Image (cartoon, rainbow, N blue to C red):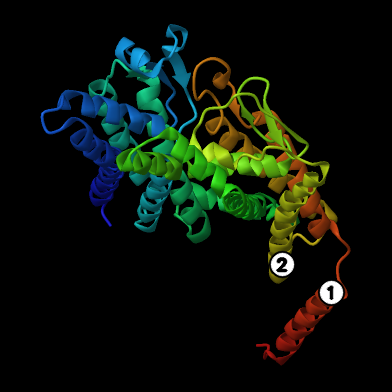
C-alpha cells in the first residue's frame, strides 16, 4: 500500500475516533437539552459543555464553578461553589485506545506503521486542539494545554500499542526487526522481554475479570441499596436514565477500585476514609446510587481476597512456562526468574497508571481525596503477581515436562538419521 494512502486512512481513522467519541457525549446531552429545556433552549451552551466532557473522558482534569442560581436551588454553601473534578469515566478513554490500536495495527499490516502512527497522532491532535479552542465553558474549565495534550497522548499510546505489537510478531523490515534480531541474540535470555509483556497482559486481563466478578457479586448482594439511593434521589425517568448512563461509562473506573480492594489497599471515598478488606471507615458520602455497592463493614476473613491477584499471577506464569516448554527456550532458572520479575514489574506499572487515572477529586472539601492509593496499589499488585508467577515459573520441572523434551529430542535425532547425506 502506498504511503499516501496509509497517511490518509490513518488520518480518517483519527477523525472517526474523535467524531464517535464526541457523538457519544453529544447525543444524550442533546436529548436532555430538548426534554428539559425545550426547543427554544440556549443551544450555545451545549457544545462547550459536551466538548469539555469529551476532554474529561480522556483524563483531562476540570474545575467546576457552579453559578449562584444553582447554589440557591440546591442549598449548596458558597464555599463549595468551585472544586476540582479529576476522576474521569474511563469508558471513553478505553474506546479511544482500542480504536487507535486497531488503526495502528492496520498501518503495520500495510507496511508503514511509523507513517500511519504519525499521521493518526497529528490528525487526532488537530481535532483535540479544535475542540479545546472552541469548547470553553464558564461552568467547566480545563487547562488549555491539558485539553489538547492528554487526549492526543491517549490516542498516540493506542496507535503505538497496535502498531508495535503487530510489527514485533510479523516483522516490519525496519527498526522493529532490528530490535527483534538484537533480542534474539541474547540466547537463552531472548524470551525475557516478550514473555514478560505477554505474561503481564495475561495477569492484567485476569485481574480485570476478577474485579468485574467482584462488582457483579456486590451488585447481587447490595442491589437493594442502589435502588434505595435511586429512589432517594427523587429523579424522573429522564434523570434516572442519565444516572444509569453515567454509571455505565464509569464502570471501568469502578473496576479499578474493585481491583484495588481485592489486592488489599482498597480505596478512599473522601479524606480520612478507607474501604478495604481489612476494614471500612466511612463518613458522610454522596448519595450517588452506585456507591450503594460499597460494603458497610469488613472482616479480616476478607483478606483472603489477595489470593485472587496471586492466582492471576499464577495463571500468567503457567501460560508463559507452557510457551517456553513448547519453544524449548528459557529453560534455565535465571531467565525464568527474570521473566517473573518482568511480569510483576509491568503489572505493577499498569496498576499504577490505572490508579492514577481512577483517583483524584469528585467534589468539594473532603471529596478531593478519592480512589485507590497509587503507590500501595502498584506495590500490592506487583508483589502478589510475583508470588503467583514465581510459584509456577520457578517450581521444579515436572516429569511430564522432562519426558516431553526427551521425546522431542529423540524425534529430532531419528529424523536426522533418516535424512540422506550428500
Question: Which SS class for mark 1?
Answer: helix
Give the side of residue 88 with respect to residue 371, left or right.
Answer: left
Q: Quadrant of the C terminus?
A: bottom right
* In-image side of 326 versus 152 (left or right): right
Residue 150 percent coordinates (x, y): 42, 29
- Marks 2/1: CA–CA distance: 12 Å
| Residue 90 seen in the current view | no
- The answer to whether 85 is drawn above or below residue 20 in the figure is above
Q: Nearer the viewer, residue 44 or 319?
A: 44
Q: Residue 221: horizontal and vertical position, in percent? A: 62, 51
Pick the front one: 7 or 229: 229
- Residue occupied by mark 1: 402
Q: Is residue 285 above or below residue 110?
A: above
Label disc, if present, on residue 322 of the rendered structure = 2
Say left or right for 283 vs 414: left
Task: Give the number of the mark in front: 2 or 1.
Answer: 2
Sequence-earlier tag: 2 or 1: 2
Residue at point 42% right, 12% down? 82
Amino acid at each position: 500500500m502506498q504511503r499516501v494512502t496509509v497517511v490518509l486512512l490513518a488520518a480518517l481513522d483519527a477523525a472517526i475516533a474523535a467524531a464517535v467519541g464526541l457523538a457519544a457525549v453529544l447525543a444524550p446531552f442533546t436529548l436532555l437539552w430538548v426534554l428539559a429545556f425545550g426547543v427554544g433552549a440556549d443551544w450555545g451552551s451545549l457544545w462547550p459543555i459536551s466538548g469539555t466532557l469529551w476532554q474529561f473522558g480522556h483524563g483531562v482534569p476540570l474545575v467546576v464553578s457552579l453559578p449562584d442560581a444553582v447554589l440557591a436551588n440546591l442549598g449548596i454553601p458558597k464555599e463549595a461553589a468551585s472544586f476540582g473534578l479529576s476522576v474521569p469515566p474511563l469508558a471513553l478513554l478505553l474506546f479511544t485506545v482500542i480504536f487507535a490500536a486497531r488503526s495502528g495495527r492496520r498501518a503495520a499490516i500495510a507496511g508503514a506503521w511509523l507513517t500511519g502512527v504519525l499521521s493518526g497522532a497529528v490528525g487526532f491532535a488537530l481535532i483535540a486542539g479544535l475542540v479545546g479552542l472552541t469548547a470553553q465553558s464558564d461552568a467547566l474549565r480545563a487547562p488549555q494545554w491539558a485539553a489538547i495534550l492528554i487526549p492526543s497522548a491517549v490516542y498516540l499510546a493506542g496507535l503505538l500499542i497496535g502498531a508495535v505489537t503487530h510489527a514485533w510478531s510479523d516483522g516490519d523490515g525496519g527498526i522493529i526487526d532490528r530490535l527483534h534480531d538484537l533480542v534474539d541474540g541474547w540466547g537463552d535470555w531472548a524470551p525475557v522481554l516478550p514473555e514478560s509483556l505477554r505474561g503481564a497482559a495475561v495477569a492484567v486481563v485476569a485481574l480485570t475479570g476478577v474485579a468485574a466478578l467482584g462488582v457483579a457479586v456486590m451488585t447481587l448482594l447490595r442491589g437493594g441499596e442502589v435502588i434505595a439511593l435511586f429512589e432517594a434521589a427523587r429523579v424522573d425517568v429522564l434523570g434516572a436514565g442519565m444516572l444509569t448512563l453515567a454509571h455505565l461509562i464509569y464502570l471501568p473506573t469502578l473496576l479499578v477500585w474493585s481491583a484495588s480492594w481485592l489486592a488489599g489497599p482498597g480505596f478512599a471515598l473522601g479524606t480520612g476514609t478507607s474501604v478495604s478488606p481489612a476494614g471500612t471507615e466511612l463518613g458522610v458520602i454522596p448519595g450517588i446510587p452506585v456507591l450503594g455497592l460499597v460494603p458497610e463493614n469488613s472482616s479480616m476473613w476478607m483478606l483472603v481476597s489477595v489470593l485472587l491477584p496471586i492466582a492471576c499471577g499464577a495463571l500468567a506464569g503457567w501460560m508463559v512456562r507452557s510457551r517456553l516448554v513448547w519453544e524449548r527456550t528459557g529453560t534455565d532458572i535465571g531467565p525464568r526468574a527474570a521473566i517473573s520479575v518482568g511480569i510483576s514489574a509491568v503489572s505493577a506499572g499498569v496498576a499504577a497508571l490505572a490508579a492514577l487515572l481512577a483517583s483524584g477529586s469528585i467534589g468539594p472539601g473532603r471529596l478531593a481525596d478519592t480512589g485507590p492509593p497509587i503507590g500501595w496499589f502498584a506495590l500490592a499488585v506487583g508483589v502478589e503477581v510475583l508470588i503467583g508467577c514465581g510459584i509456577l515459573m520457578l517450581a521444579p520441572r515436572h516429569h511430564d515436562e522432562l519426558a516431553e523434551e526427551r521425546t522431542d529430542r529423540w524425534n529430532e535425532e531419528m529424523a536426522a538419521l533418516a535424512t540422506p547425506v550428500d
